[in-house]
Image (cartoon, rainbow, N blue to C red):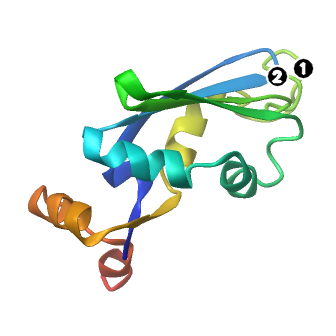
Amino acid sequence: MTQFYLRELAHARSGDKGDTSNIGVIAYREAFYPLIVAQVTVERVRAHFKGLVKGRITRYELPRFSAINLVLEESLGGGVTRSLSLDPHGKSYSALILTMVIEVDEANAALLRVAGRQPVDNLNER
């Protein structure tokens, strides 16, 4: 197994409403979707967003789109009008989720390398 950042397998979009953030993670290829479903779990998302998400995390699978949707409640310090945070919007959460490390099998790692994507260990050697 080889480690890649999620950003090498997928792109993401996010938004917010009040104190709830919504993140869509969409696989670049159908072949990457099972890796995302298996590894971008509620538990891992909670650990990845440690200290930011105080409420429930709900994950919805969208296999026809090779995507998942994450709803993070109580994640924005009360929301735009109530938070003292400099950036209380959920927009930046899409960038944060893409820094999650994913274990990739050798067949998919080969697809990623052909596309010019670098494993985590190669990035750390620079």
| Residue 11 visible in rendering | yes
Circles 2, 1 touching at the beta carbon (< 8 Å): yes
Callout 1 amino acid: Arg
Front residue of this view, candidates 64 and 76: 64
Quarter holding the C terminus is bottom left
- The spot of residue 95 in percent (x, y) is 50, 43
Seen at 57% across and 36% down, the residue is 92
Whole-number angstrom distance, CA of label 2 to CA of label 1: 9 Å
**What's the mark number on residue 19?**
2
Query: Disc 1 on helix, strand or loop?
Result: loop
Front residue of this view, candidates 13 and 35: 35
Q: Is residue 71 left or right of residue 104?
A: right
Read off the residue under disc 1: 82
- The spot of residue 87 in percent (x, y) is 69, 32
The first of marks 2 and 1 along the sequence is: 2
Number of disc labels: 2
Q: In this view, does 36 lie above or below 113?
A: above
